[in-house]
Image (cartoon, rainbow, N blue to C red):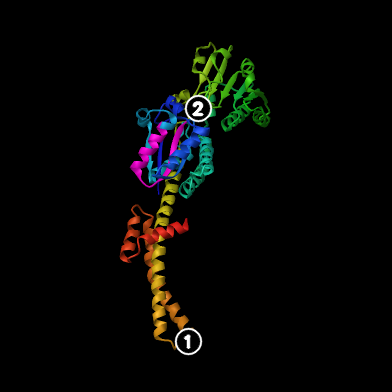
Amino acid sequence: MSVLTIGLSHRTAPVAMLERVSLSGDALAKLLHDVQQDVCVAETMVVSTCNRVEVYAAVDRFHAAVTSVTRLLSEHTGVPAAELTPHLYVHYEDRAVEHLFSVVCGLDSMVVGEGQILGQVRRALKLGQKHGTVGATLNELVQRALRVGKRAHTDTGLDQAGASLVHAGLAFAGPIEGRRALVVGAGSMSALAAATLRRAGAGEIVIANRTFERGARLAETVGGRAVRLGELTRELAAADLVITCTGGGDHVITPGMLGREVFLLDLAMPHDIDPAVRQVPGVTLVDLETIQESGIGSREGDAVQSVRELVAEELAAFLGAERAARVTPTVVALRSKAAGVVEAELGRLMMRLPELDGRARGEIAQTVQRVVDKLLHEPTVRVKQLATSPGGDHYAEALRELFDLDPKMPEAVREVEL
């Protein structure tokens, strides 16, 4: 199986298009199920965030899988294929692995180096596991990618170099200290927003959420207070700055709810705040389009270059191990054939020399086995080494041809290992 990635992100599509293709909840689960049911696809996982929608799949046919996944993306998002296709990118095999490694490190994010993508990819993996669409291939790849992402943040100083979307958005707000802040939502992005506001010295932090208990738990962590979403209009009248991150699909803030000067930061996808609020005097609205156009967080430095080098290093190691693993069944098949030959010849010898005692028989068997092991050692070690290089599969093919191995044997061994 080979890994295929098809998706679109802030690099290839405007935020308006990303908003149209954003999937969550039952809609996301349905896409997972339908992609996995395709005859070309063995496994699948979908990463859906405010910056990207990407389908990762383990496939056995490239062109057929690309056609099927593109069609399903179009059907499930409701965006006609003719509109969707120009924004899509396709990565396959080595390039798909490199892309995922770069994504989890934050190199492909709107704000370079942001750390939220690690949690988002982890949740995508868990969702695929929950629905039974992730198997050994994607699980191994994503687990490795997550470890690479952690290394990027702990070993390179990327945390100091890369801001989050919250930091990028609040850069437009001016000083935070002493100002009354309102956070709408209580998910992971809302938690990050609340923590950022607390560290910046916000005078009061109010959490408004549909589920009051969840909002109250978040408010407690930042020394704030919680209100129900139905009280939002009243709280807006007292807030100096507002951050929304519900992504529920409906506008939770509209022009009629605002009547004073206020800074609004909409980090949701789809948008939480009606863009028409920009027409209200004294209201400043910053959303994902604003951040994207500003280029905040897109600058590269030494830490980002270090991460790029880390990705290249980890990619080479992963691909080398994967290629070596591919040749292992052939090596096992070779040793299995050799063992069969040894067993047959020893049996024939013992029938011809029945007078040999047990000790002599044992010595002969050990000697023959040592000879075979020594003869096979160098070629099997060498073929594993050569297999780690590009085109390494050809060496396994040569081994099967030279020793007349059953072409079905390596596949049988691989299935037993899995």
In space, the residues marked 1 and 2 are separated at their CA atoms by 81 Å
Amino acid marked by disc 1 = Asp
User: Is 331 a magenta residue?
Assistant: no
Closer to the eye: label 1 or 2: 1
Is 230 located above or below residue 54 in the figure? Answer: above
Tell me if I can see residue 295 in this picture: no
Q: Residue at x 38, y 35 (%)?
A: 70
Residue 47, position as x, y percentages in the image: 48, 37
User: Is 71 a magenta residue?
Assistant: yes
Residue 14, position as x, y percentages in the image: 41, 26
Dividing the picture into quadrants, the one containing residue 13 is: top left
Is 336 located above or below residue 271 in the figure? Answer: below
Residue 64, position as x, y percentages in the image: 34, 42
Decide which of tag 1 and tag 2 comes sooner along the chain. Answer: 2
Amino acid marked by disc 2 = Met
Which numbered dot is residue 357? 1
Residue 60, position as x, y percentages in the image: 38, 47
* Residue that numbered label 2 is attached to: 269
Which numbered dot is residue 279? none
**In the image, which residues are magenta?**
51-74
Tell me if I can see residue 39 in this picture: yes
